[in-house]
Image (cartoon, rainbow, N blue to C red):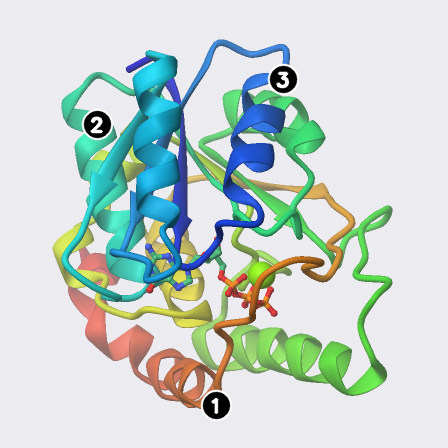
Amino acid sequence: MRGLTVVLPTYNERENIERIVESILDQPLDLSVLIVDDNSPDGTGEIADRLAAADDRIEVLHRQGKEGLGTAYRAGFCYALERGAQYCFEIDADFSHNPDDLPRLYEAARGADAAVGSRYVKGGGAPDWSFLRWLISRGGNLYTKIVARTRTVDTTSGFRCYSRRVLESIPLDRVTSQGYAFQIEMTFVAETLGFRIVEVPIIFVDRKGGESKMNSAIFWEGLRVVWGLRRKYGDLRRG
Ligand SMILES: Nc1nc2c(ncn2[C@@H]2O[C@H](COP(=O)(O)OP(=O)(O)OP(=O)(O)O)[C@@H](O)[C@H]2O)c(=O)[nH]1
Ligand SMILES: [Mg+2]
């Protein structure tokens, strides 16, 4: 495993997995890819094994069943850190995030502690979204800013680069949320610990292949988790 590891959680991404891994490894960075597959019923895990057998830059972490995005990232980060990763990236497998943005994300993280691909800074956006979809995302971020007092604008973004020191400092076993709330919680804890997060503009496009895993439970989890963040991590704020 290389110093720069892209953690790629997959659940039923057979239409995307091969192409996304290829576009990640095409980038002008010395990257390895860690696929974290939750026993996808559509056979994504078998495709991942085949890719890993053919290229030593690719590894696969198989989990028993669909355990959620948050724990997939936690497991992936721990696995990568144990094997010496200096930077860990997060990216969706469905091409909503453009792998061509990885080098910019890395440069930004190197100049700070972590970088977040942001739809809400100048040059960023989500052109495929309906007004309602935009409102939910913007509203969620505004709610987070007011309630949890985060500085990062796009706290729900799942396109990121963390330096090793950030991931080692965050008590990952306490970050228990799963959906967008996982991204918010990681952002909140990193900011609370005093790390500098830089936002890099990205254009987020809707998935073309495969099915969405978004549901209302993820939305409600976000509202609830954000509400409790300052109390949950009160010890870090005082410390
Ligand atoms: N390992 C694992 N991966 C997951 C799980 N849920 C989602 N993913 C992956 O996480 C990434 C983001 O999930 P998406 O379903 O695209 O979620 P989204 O972007 O909010 O919604 P859509 O793009 O509209 O589907 C994708 O690569 C999924 O395959 C999970 O429970 N386990
Ligand atoms: Mg998606």
Q: Where is residue 45 drawn, in percent x and y?
A: 31, 45
Q: Vertical placement of 83 versus 76: above or below?
A: above
Q: On the image, which quarter does residue 106 sit in?
A: top right
Callout in the foreground (2, 3): 3
Residue at image coords 69%, 76% = 138
Is the distance from the Cβ of mark 1 to the nearest ligand 1 atom less than 8 Å? Answer: no
Gap in Å between the C-alphas at discs 1 and 3?
35 Å
Instruction: Check disc 1 and report the residue beneath it.
Output: 216
Q: Earlier in the sequence, mark 1 or mark 2?
A: 2
Query: Quadrant where the N terminus lies?
Result: top left
Q: Earlier in the sequence, mark 1 or mark 3?
A: 3
Question: Where ligand 2 lies, by quadrant?
Answer: bottom right
Query: SS for tag 1?
Result: helix
Query: SS for tag 2?
Result: helix
Callout in the foreground (1, 2): 1
Q: Where is residue 121 drawn, in percent x and y?
A: 77, 52
Q: Where is residue 48 drawn, in percent x and y?
A: 36, 35
Gap in Å between the C-alphas at discs 1 and 2?
33 Å
Task: Compare residues 174 and 131 and report the one nearer the observer.
Answer: 131
Name the disc covering residue 81, or none.
2
Residue at image coords 57%, 25% = 22
Name the disc covering residue 27, or none.
3
Q: Mark 2 packing: few (<14 Cα in 10 Å), some, or many (20+)? A: some
